[in-house]
Amino acid sequence: MGRIVPIPWKQFERVLLRIGCEFLYQKGSHRVYWKQGIQRPIIVPAYKELPPFIIKNNLRILNVTNEEYLSILKDL
């Protein structure tokens, strides 16, 4: 199993879109995504590099495991 490392927000956005999320709106530097069946929206700050804790928190909301995330990331 690999570990989650910082990645650019645009790359994480591609992961979200592959999972089935859709972009709703942007307020300041924060982009908001939604997917049917989740409890709250996914918030992604438009930072040059997203820290691992933001990625992990959003994966927990989406109910996606680290292994699934790393597999999707590898396929991009």
Image (cartoon, rainbow, N blue to C red):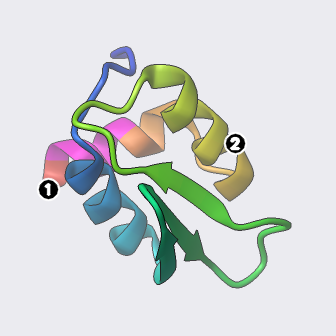
Residue for point 80% across, 65% down:
40
Q: Secondary structure at mark 2?
A: helix
The magenta stretch is 70-74
Q: Main secondary structure of the magenta part?
A: helix
* Image vertical order of residue 25 relative to residue 17, above or below: below
Quickly name the residue at label 2. 60
Identify the image quadrant of the C terminus. bottom left
10 Å neighbourhood of mark 1: few (<14), some, or many (≥20)?
Answer: few
Res. 47 image quadrant: top left
Marks 2 and 1 close (CB-CB < 8 Å)? no
Residue 44 among magenta residues:
no
Q: Position of residue 30 (x, y in %)?
A: 49, 57
From the viewer's side, name the closer residue of 21 and 44: 44
Q: Is residue 43 above or below residue 50?
A: below
Packing grade of label 2 (10 A; few <14, some 14-19, many >=20) is: few
Where in the figure is residue 72, as x and y percent of width and height?
Answer: 30, 51
